[in-house]
Image (cartoon, helix red, strand yellow):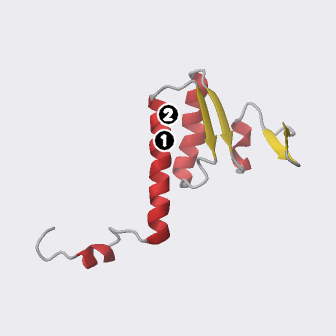
Amino acid sequence: MAAGTSLHRRHSRGVFLAGAARTLALLLLLAALALLTAYLEDRPFYLFDEWAADQDPHFRRIFYEELLPDLKARGKIVICVTHDDRWFHLADRVYQMNEGRIEAAPSV
């Protein structure tokens, strides 16, 4: 640490996160690392369960409009679970839970 720099000063500049912010940042990092690992391993099947829910709008758009179409173009099987109906139109098929049963959703 440089002379005259204290942990308090570094903390007041936002270098260190506390509590819930630290936990959320760690979870987002782990999600990104898991996605990167699966992508680089070139797996035949991908399951994303609310992966984009906590992402900022920029990365959420990249996930739905760039990453998922790229996986599809490469012949991968992708199941993406989301409650965010703004992205349903990008799916080949949409299913929903109805009283504990999975069924085809009405056309989007």
How many numbered badges does the structure rendering display? 2
Mark number for residue 65?
Answer: none
Q: Position of residue 58 (x, y in %)?
A: 52, 50
Q: Position of residue 8 (x, y in %)?
A: 27, 79
Q: Quadrant of residue 1?
A: bottom left
Q: Residues within 10 Å of mark 2 (few under 14, many from 20)?
A: some
Q: Which residue corresponds to the image point at 57% horizontal and 48% vertical from the top-left?
A: 60
The quadrant the C terminus occupies is top right
Q: Position of residue 86 (x, y in %)?
A: 71, 48
Question: What amino acid does circle 2 point to?
Answer: Ala
Above or below, 66 relative to 9: above
Question: What amino acid does circle 1 point to?
Answer: Ala
The reply to whether discs 2 and 1 touch (Cβ–Cβ < 8 Å) is yes
Residue that badge 1 annotates: 34
Front-lying residue, 26 or 60 = 26
| Residue reaching furthest to the left | 3
Front-lying residue, 16 or 74 = 16
As drawn, is 3 to the left or to the right of 6?
Answer: left
Mark number for residue 38?
Answer: 2
**Distance in Å between CA atoms under marks 2 and 1:** 6 Å
Q: Quadrant of residue 54?
A: bottom right
Q: Quadrant of residue 47?
A: top right
Front-lying residue, 43 or 93 = 43
For numbered disc 1, what is the local secondary structure? helix
| Residue reaching furthest to the top | 75
As drawn, is 19 to the left or to the right of 15?
Answer: right
Q: Which residue corresponds to the image point at 39% horizontal and 68% vertical from the top-left?
A: 17
Q: Which residue corresponds to the image point at 44% horizontal and 51% vertical from the top-left?
A: 29
As drawn, is 21 to the left or to the right of 73?
Answer: left
Above or below, 56 relative to 96: below
